[in-house]
Image (cartoon, grey):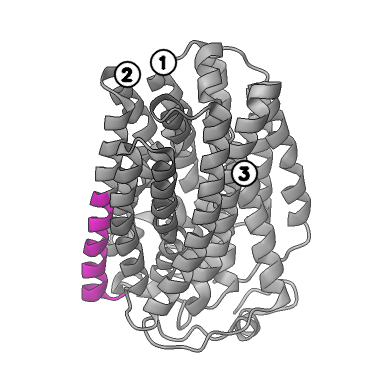
Amino acid sequence: MFRLVGKLSLPLYQVACGSPGILGMSTKPTPLNAQQMRLLAVLALINFVNFAARQAVVPLIPLLRDHLHATDAQLGDLQTWLLVVLAIASIPFGFLADRFSRKSIIATGIICWSVASFAGGLFSTFLYFLSARALVGLGEAAYAPAAQSMISGAFPQERRAFAQAIFAAGMLLGGASGLALGGIVGPRYGWQAVLFVVAILGIFPGLALLGIEEPPRGPRSEVVPIPRLLSVPAFVSLIAAGICITFSSVSLISWGVDFAVNYKDFSLREASVSLALVTLFALVLGVLAGGYVADRLQRSFVYGRIIAVAAAFLLAAPFLLLAIQSEEKSTVLVGFFIASFFMSWYHGPVTAVLHDMMPRRAHATSVGVYMFATQLIGGLGPHIVGKISDQHDLQLGLQIAVAVMVCGALLMFLVIHFIRRDGIRHPILEAFRVEPGD
């Protein structure tokens, strides 16, 4: 039997979304309906505010270095420990999201990051501030697996990468807005004011969440044990690639503004606003282009979305090195623009691939396991780059981060190998699929 959600049973909801078709074969895209658009808009708004709260601290690093008397390694820990908490909490929240109300879990995440952000503005010692920033990670751990599961449940498989890309666009817009907010408000009103603002902003997506309905999913009895998920070689290989990509991405994001200020002669305001504008346009264009290209390739190849991701990171690497090594401000910004465009191709397709691999009742759990590994290990990047900066210089640390990113891109070809060998849906999970295309 199928569980009813709102007024739609599972088969009827699929009729509204369009039939899933067969992965890797040409299918005609189905027009989106109002319910799908509303759900996607609200979840993208949540992603926007959360990442604004996360990234608003990045341009504050020069201010925090003076106020908290912290080393670069300690300042790198602000991002690292946030990701550690996010990683540890991702598995239990993903587990719960596959079994209970995803809206309730998302609401819990909003409360967590808003309270933690506000508390961070009240503390003036590094240890307490670090603790508050780390707890911001609880918010993303709660909402991300649940939100991505809802999106894949609401959209047909041939549109998943683009739908997830729109959700990721909210994250990228929020991150760029957070950079601009911190760089403008922090020097004028103090770093505490920045945290108070982003905490209050959390109220709005919480209210918008009340007006959406949850898409259906498979029976609760069909949930998949985590050891069974880890028996899928393509999934494990994708996690390994994601660890490398996360290491490099969060390192570049965490240290980008400080690097521009101390190595490229940008002022704090100039670096924050310039990088925010560059990444705003590049990331949004890139994430939408990546989702579109990935879905197009998926119609021809069962591993088409992975091809898009791997190629994008290999294209991004030389432009990152150009930005890191150039002395001209304009060249630095152009290099970051092109690199950011290609790096943002990752977000929509990788979530779509995770959900394509897994039965419907394992969507949130698989994302939780993926986030646990990638954020826990990859999240060490800002700390390691900070240590390299303390002992050598920040430029060397960022160059190493680029090399790790290239390793992640190459590991994507291992994912392709396993998908070609075993199929996108590994036979070991067939017992947990309750319908074709699940």
Residue for badge 3: 177
For marks 3 and 1, the one nearer the N-term is: 1
> x, y percentage for residue 424?
33, 73
Magenta residue check for 212: no
* Residue at the image position 50 percent from the left and 55 percent from the top: 283
* Residue at the image position 49 percent from the left and 55 percent from the top: 282
Is the residue under label 1 in contact with that under label 2 (CB below 8 Å)? Answer: yes
Which numbered circle lies on residue 71? 1
Q: In this view, does 396 lie to the left or right of 368?
A: left
Mark-to-mark CA distance, 2 and 3: 29 Å
Tell me which segment is drawn in magenta: 406-423
Q: Is residue 181 left or right of residue 230?
A: right
* Residue at the image position 49 percent from the left and 77 percent from the top: 157
Residue for badge 2: 390
Q: Residues within 10 Å of mark 1 (few under 14, many from 20)?
A: some
Is the residue under label 3 in contact with that under label 2 (CB below 8 Å)? Answer: no
For marks 2 and 1, the one nearer the N-term is: 1
Q: How crowded is mark 3: few (under 14 residues within 10 Å), some or many (20 or more)?
A: many
Numbered disc 2: secondary structure: helix
**Kind of residue indicated by mark 2:** Asp
Is residue 345 depicted above or below 176 in this figure?
below
